[in-house]
Image (cartoon, helix red, strand yellow):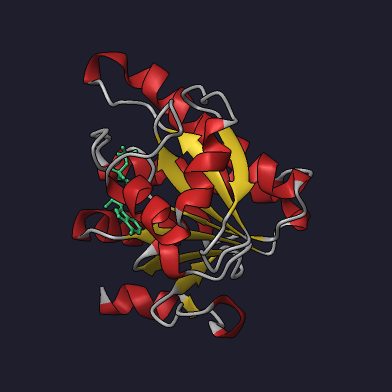
Amino acid sequence: TLSLLYKLNKIDPSPLGPLNNATAAHNGQIGIIRGDITTLAVDAIVNAANKSLLGGGGVDGAIHRAAGPGLVAECRTLDGCDTGSSKITNAYKLPAKKVIHTVGPIYNSLYQQRCEAALRGCYQSALQLAVQNELKTIAFSAISTGIYGYPSPAAARIACSTAKDFLNGEDGDKLDRIIFVTFEEKDVNAYNRILPSDTSSE
Ligand code: ADP
């Protein structure tokens, strides 16, 4: 992995808070960082929520704990969210400006295409919401790869290719940076394997 790291550029951590273990690809527009997403002072963090949007375990629980009770109160007004879609709220006590809640698919190997389309929808809809709200830096948790059981390599591949397609599309120049936040080793490995080959060449 050391030689891999040499291929990536260090990204400037200064405006974003504790991003000093971050690496970047796609001309610095896509970054990967290992850590707690609730600590990032970015424009938007993306929560791996469930359809109720009323909180849960994993990263969802961590975000609600750190944001305080204002977050669930606002989420109660949203009437839930479909799988593969996203909704936006304020961020309350979090250092981020906004929280984008997206609902990943519960992985089922019998329905791989449906799962892939839903996961792609999560990343696309969250990126669209960021642009609509004039947010320029967005940090994603590894949607569906925890309790929802999506295999990390496949999920990371979808995350990276969707981000790259978005940056190459008509709204791509409206975003400064997309950051993938990894937490567990399996996701660190998945993103480190995929990002250089998939996104740094352009
Ligand atoms: P899902 O139900 O969509 O699978 P989880 O919250 O169970 O959601 O897991 C999504 C990802 O979030 C997992 O990769 C997990 O390791 C990661 N995660 C858990 N806590 C945090 C955190 N505080 N910051 C960033 N990522 C986290």
Q: Residue at x 41, y 51 (%)?
A: 64
Give residue 93's position: percent from left, percent from top.
52, 64
Position of the C terminus by quadrant: bottom right
Q: Viewer-proximal residue, 109 or 126? A: 126
Give residue 71's position: percent from left, percent from top.
51, 48
- Vertically, is 109 above or below 100? above
Q: Residue at x 40, y 17 (%)?
A: 114
Q: Is residue 58 left or right of residue 194?
A: left
Residue 161 visible in the snapshot = no
- Vertically, is 52 above or below 7? above
Give residue 125's position: percent from left, percent from top.
61, 35
Give residue 23's position: percent from left, percent from top.
44, 73
Q: Is residue 94 left or right of residue 105?
A: right
- Vertically, is 120 above or below 108? below
- Vertically, is 155 above or below 142? above
Name the residue furthest top: 110
Label tally: 0
Position of the N terminus by quadrant: bottom left
Q: Is residue 129 left or right of residue 80?
A: right
Q: Residue at x 77, y 55 (%)?
A: 174
Q: Residue at x 39, y 19 (%)?
A: 113
